Image (cartoon, helix red, strand yellow):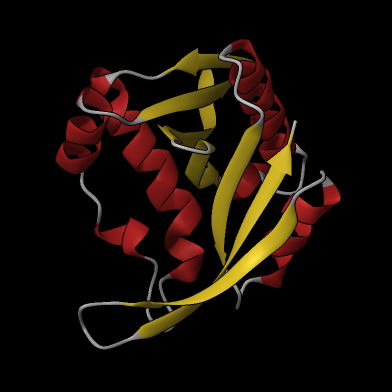
């Protein structure tokens, strides 16, 4: 597997990977806001303060993660692996690569938020050393509330 640090020109690839991976959440209440993002919104974010890694297998994009540096560490989100490659350890490989990147930038904490209604994702992070440190309810503009847990890992 190879990894590429994304730039704004990679927004179409990131968008396609993310949509494929997040389609499984389209019937959640509410559906993931990832499904509302556009190539343009991702491109703009990558030109501002957001970064991303794309994972390639045989030169084909198979997964990605987006992230940004925040005051207390590296916050990642939208971790995505295309459905036909899920369950093969690719998400863990992407996160391992992200940890190496963080260490090289002298950052010792990785953070993320996970929907409480998706225990398989919480378990994925726990299995590689993340712990829940907070729970909250996100209040969306449409009046829908989403229970999330905040997770972190010291590296």
Q: Quadrant of the C terminus?
A: top right
43 to 18, vertically: above or below: above
> Would residue 119 appear left or right of 145 to someone viewing this image?
right
| Relative image position of residue 73 (x, y in whole percent) | 54, 35
- Please indicate, yes or no, whether residue 42 appears anywhere in the rendered image: yes
Q: Nearer the viewer, residue 85 or 91?
A: 91
| Relative image position of residue 132 (x, y in whole percent) | 70, 62
> Would residue 57 appear left or right of 20 to someone viewing this image?
right
**Which residue corresponds to the image point at 21% horizontal and 83% vertical from the top-left?**
142
> Would residue 129 appear left or right of 111 to someone viewing this image?
right
Q: Nearer the viewer, residue 35 or 149?
A: 149
**Which residue corresponds to the image point at 82% horizontal and 44% vertical from the top-left?**
128
| Relative image position of residue 29 (x, y in whole percent) | 42, 84
Q: Quadrant of the N terminus?
A: top right
Q: Nearer the viewer, residue 42 or 141?
A: 141
Work out which residue is located at the far bottom of the displayed protein and give it.
Answer: 143
28 to 78, vertically: above or below: below
**Which residue corresponds to the image point at 36% horizontal and 41% vertical from the top-left?**
16
| Relative image position of residue 64 (x, y in whole percent) | 50, 34
- Which quarter of the picture shows residue 17? top left
> Would residue 68 appear left or right of 127 to someone viewing this image?
left
**Which residue corresponds to the image point at 60% horizontal and 24% vertical from the top-left?**
107
- Please indicate, yes or no, whether residue 1 appears anywhere in the rendered image: no
């Amino acid at each position: 597997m190879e990894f590429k640090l994304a730039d704004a020109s990679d927004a179409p690839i990131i968008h396609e990977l993310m949509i494929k991976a997040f389609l499984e959440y389209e019937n959640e209440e509410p559906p993931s806001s990832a499904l509302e993002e556009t190539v343009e919104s991702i491109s703009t974010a990558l030109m501002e303060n957001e970064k991303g890694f794309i994972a390639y297998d045989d030169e084909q994009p198979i997964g990605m993660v987006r992230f940004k540096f925040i005051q207390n560490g590296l916050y990642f989100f939208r971790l995505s692996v295309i459905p036909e490659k899920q369950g093969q350890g690719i998400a863990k490989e992407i996160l391992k690569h992200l940890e190496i990147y963080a260490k090289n930038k002298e950052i010792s904490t990785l953070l993320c938020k996970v929907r409480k209604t998706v225990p398989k994702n919480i378990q994925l992070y726990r299995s590689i050393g993340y712990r829940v440190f907070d729970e909250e309810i996100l209040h969306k503009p449409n009046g829908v509330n989403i229970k999330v847990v905040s997770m972190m890992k010291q590296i």
